[in-house]
Amino acid sequence: MVEVLVVAFFGGLGSVARSLLGNFKGYLPWGILAANTLGTAIAAWSMLTQPQLGLVLVAGLAGGLSTFSTFVAQTWQLVQSDRRVAAFLNVLLNLLLPYTALMLVGFSL
């Protein structure tokens, strides 16, 4: 039961951070891009260096911080507003930057 509460607490922290980051928008939804990249880096670091904290950091903090549904919704909004280049760039960067974060964390250890 304690594990569930700890994951819920850290998931809440991640969700609040995502909500705050989500306010940073411009040509692209930069805040969610940053949240997804940071969430991936946290998950990668945790799995590679602190596996005992995996449940808390991956399922909790990184899970609350990163979000696929917001990324998809924002990409659809870009398509609907006829900003197809921005939508394509958003998809590309949301795949490339988190993967790059994973590689950087993995190679730095």
Image (cartoon, rainbow, N blue to C red):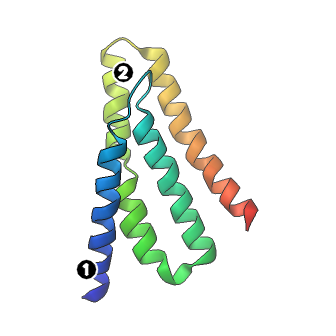
- The C terminus appears in which quarter of the rendering? bottom right
Residue 38 position (above or below residue 22): below
Circle number at residue 78: 2
Please tell me whether mark 1 or mark 2 is closer to you in this view: 1
| Residue 2 image point, x, y percent | 27, 88
Q: Amino acid at mark 1?
A: Leu
Q: Is residue 20 left or right of residue 90?
A: left
Q: Is residue 40 left or right of residue 65?
A: right
Q: Which of 29 and 21 lies nearest the eye of the viewer?
A: 21
Residue 68 position (above or below residue 55): above
Q: Amino acid at mark 2?
A: Leu
Neighbours of disc 1 within 10 Å: few (<14), some (14-19), many (20+): few
Tell me which corner region of the image, top left, top right, bottom left or bottom right, holds residue 50: bottom right
Disc 1 is placed on an element classified as helix
Residue at 42%, 76% (x, y): give it. Answer: 55
- Pointer 1: what residue? 5
Q: Is residue 51 left or right of residue 4?
A: right
| Residue 102 image point, x, y percent | 62, 56
